[in-house]
Image (spheres, helix red, strand yellow):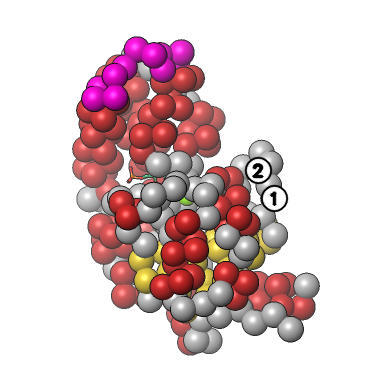
């Protein structure tokens, strides 16, 4: 029988709604530079790193050949400045409903927990949410060479938790993240994922539906 020993969580859109702050920061940058950028476009950026996200926005606007690598870096830094201003408003009240209770129950059941976020701001966000001490390992996005959908970040977390991938469940709100979890050989729980190719193994419409017994049973008996 399968035995689940580790939970690996994405941050943005799973533990808190920073996905919206990322959208607002990209929107502000787009307004400054005259780019079109909608909430629908934003779905393509979820789970995608900063530079790749900007490249997608430029591509949507057919401007991918108009900016040098140096200018792309400058624009990405501008977006990050907007984002960093926005996240300072985060408080522990911004932990998504159901998450704190789920983490407490998981830890009491001796499930090891980690964070696999592509965000270089993850540490600060977790600190503002007062969640940092709930995890046995928090991946450093700047040390990850291959962004999601590559499995590197989830595999790094499993290794740091001293677990096999098949003993871990990954939690994600983004299609790129679900692919990353599957490529790592882990079980997946999707939170309101906009599915374009790979479906999560367990689909939830919000974090309010997180239920330890249900997830463990579905995987271990499945
Ligand atoms: C991911 C978000 O978690 O982090 C993406 O889903 C974001 O939208 C990426 O682009 C990188 O974040 P940051 O904070 O390093 O720009
Ligand atoms: Mg996410």
Relative to 161, residue 184 above or below: above
Magenta segment, which residues? 61-71
Name the residue at 31% across, 75% down: 133
Relative to 77, residue 173 above or below: below
Q: Residues within 10 Å of mark 2 (few under 14, many from 20)?
A: some
Q: Secondary structure at mark 1?
A: loop
Name the residue at 39% across, 14% down: 65
Is 69 a magenta residue?
yes
Marks 2 and 1 sit apart, C-alpha to C-alpha, by: 6 Å
**105 left or right of 131 in image:** right
| Quadrant location, the C terminus | bottom right
| Quadrant location, the N terminus | bottom right
Q: Position of residue 124 (x, y in %)?
A: 25, 57
Name the residue at 49% across, 48% down: 148
Q: Which residue is mark 2?
A: 195
Name the residue at 66% across, 77% down: 216
Instruction: Tell me whether circle 2 and circle 1 mark residues in contact (CB < 8 Å).
Output: yes
Q: Position of residue 163 (x, y in %)?
A: 51, 77
The kind of secondary structure the magenta stretch mainly shows is loop
Is 187 a magenta residue?
no
Q: Position of residue 15 (x, y in %)?
A: 44, 60
Q: Which residue is mark 1?
A: 199
Q: Residues within 10 Å of mark 1 (few under 14, many from 20)?
A: some
Q: Residue 5 is drawn in which quadrant?
A: bottom right
């Amino acid at each position: 029988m399968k035995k689940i020993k580790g939970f690996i969580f994405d941050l943005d859109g799973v533990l808190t709604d920073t996905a919206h702050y990322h959208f607002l920061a990209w929107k502000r940058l787009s307004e400054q530079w005259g780019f079109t950028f909608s909430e629908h476009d934003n779905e393509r950026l979820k789970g995608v790193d900063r530079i790749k996200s900007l490249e997608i926005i430029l591509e949507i606007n057919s401007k991918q050949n108009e900016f040098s690598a140096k200018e792309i870096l400058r624009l990405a830094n501008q977006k990050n400045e907007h984002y960093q201003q926005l996240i300072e408003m985060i408080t522990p009240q911004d932990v998504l409903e159901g998450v704190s209770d789920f983490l407490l129950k998981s830890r009491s059941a001796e499930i090891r927990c980690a964070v696999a976020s592509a965000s270089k701001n993850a540490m600060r966000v977790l600190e503002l949410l007062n969640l940092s001490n709930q995890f046995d390992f928090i991946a450093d996005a700047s040390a990850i060479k291959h962004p999601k959908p590559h499995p590197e970040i989830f595999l790094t977390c499993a290794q740091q938790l001293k677990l096999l991938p098949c003993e871990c469940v990954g939690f994600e709100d983004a299609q790129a993240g679900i692919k990353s979890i599957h490529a790592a050989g882990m079980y997946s729980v999707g939170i309101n994922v906009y599915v374009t190719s790979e479906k999560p193994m367990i689909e939830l419409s919000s974090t309010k539906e997180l239920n330890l017994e249900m997830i463990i049973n579905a995987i271990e008996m499945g």
